[in-house]
Image (tube, rainbow, N blue to C red):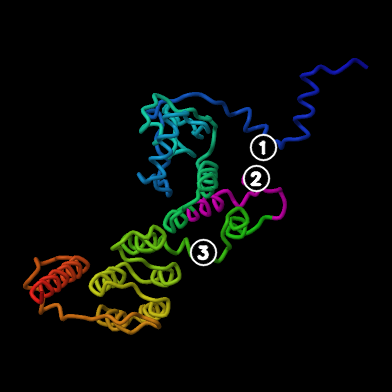
Amino acid sequence: MGKRSAAGLLTSVDSIFTTQEERDNAQRSYVTDLSAAEISDFPNHPFKVRMDQSMVELADSVKQYGVLVPSLVRPMPDGSYQMVSGHRRKRAAELAGLPTVPCIIRELTDDEAIIVMVDSNLQREQILPSEKAFAYKMKLEAMKRQGMRTDLTSAPVGPKLRSNKELSEQSPDSVTQIKRYIRLTNLIPELLDMVDNSVLKEAGKLQMALRPAVELSYLSEAEQTALLEVMEGEIRTPSHAQAIKMRSFSEQGKLNPDVILSIMQEEKPNQVEQFKIPRERIDKFFKPGTPAQKIEDTIVKALELYRKRQREMER
């Protein structure tokens, strides 16, 4: 028997240490440089590209060393490309003034692209609750459309698992936690922003924990809007117990602005005592529509100025 060629030997070794899926992907993938103008963003991309300090640092690094890890894109029927993974790298390259971005071009179906996009972005250091919420929802829907085919999600072919259980096995969160995140997609944007603020910790913005937010997601849009007005007026967010109570009233068809205000004015455990001034006593000093937080800040500054002048007079 003649000796096998080196190429034949390599092919044999490759077949032992790689899966068929990996070999198929390698055959339909290649790397090239593309201009940012050729690459459209992923539709309804749930992960925000924020212009924060991290982006500034990434842009500086790209300007100095270039893009070290290629982005993943897929070709579109019109000849353009769609970003699957690498939105932040693309933006950093634009900020750094680079003419092109190194990209891996791979043929992917819509659902395959969604799964890859979500999985690659879940590795970020900081992910906002709203980002996880819409990402998990998109991936779960894609997996369901695939008929829960485990062979398309890098899991062994065998008994079909329920999509949400399979999703949790491929994610850093449990089934219960994933369900909670997906519930957040039912919140109006203003309330969802408050859940994100619990992570971002931006001064002067209302923050809301995940558990009460999940309970509030069962309220209708009109009820959530009414709650938002009360929250802004009271400058506070509901506790988990208060949110549960609102959901209960909503399910009974008894939740209205007066009930919401009554629940929100209940004292929370360990709540810091607050001093309140009737709104009608101070309305004449502010323009109509002035946010409650601005009114509070103005009053505090006025009192500080008053105390300073009092001290000056006592000298």
Magenta region, residue range: 136-159
Q: Residues within 10 Å of mark 2 (few under 14, many from 20)?
A: few
| Label 1 or label 2, whichever comes before in sequence order | 1
Residue at the limit of the structure toward the top, as seen here: 2
Instruction: State the residue position of label 2.
Output: 154
Q: Is residue 188 left or right of residue 113?
A: left
Residue 21 is tagged as 1
Q: How far apart, in angstroms, are the residues tagged by discs 1 and 3? A: 30 Å
Marks 1 and 2, Cα distance to the nearest angstrom? 8 Å
- Spot the residue most to the front: 315
Query: Between residues 37 and 20, which one lies in front from this camera angle?
Result: 37
Image marks 1 and 2: residues in contact by CB distance under 8 Å: yes
Give the class, few, some or many, for how many residues have Cα within 10 Å of label 3's Cα (few <14, many ≥20).
Answer: some
* Residue named by callout 3: 179
User: Disc 2 on helix, strand or loop?
Assistant: loop
Disc on the earlier residue, 1 or 3: 1
Q: Amino acid at mark 3?
A: Lys
Q: Position of residue 42 (x, y in %)?
A: 43, 41
Is 20 above or below relative to 27? Answer: below
Q: Is residue 196 above or below residue 3?
A: below
Name the foreground residue: 53 vs 74. Answer: 53
Secondary element at image label 1: helix
**Could you tell whether 191 is left or right of 135 in the image?**
left
* Residue 61 sits above or below residue 284 on the image: above
x and y, in percent, of residue 139 in the image: 52, 51
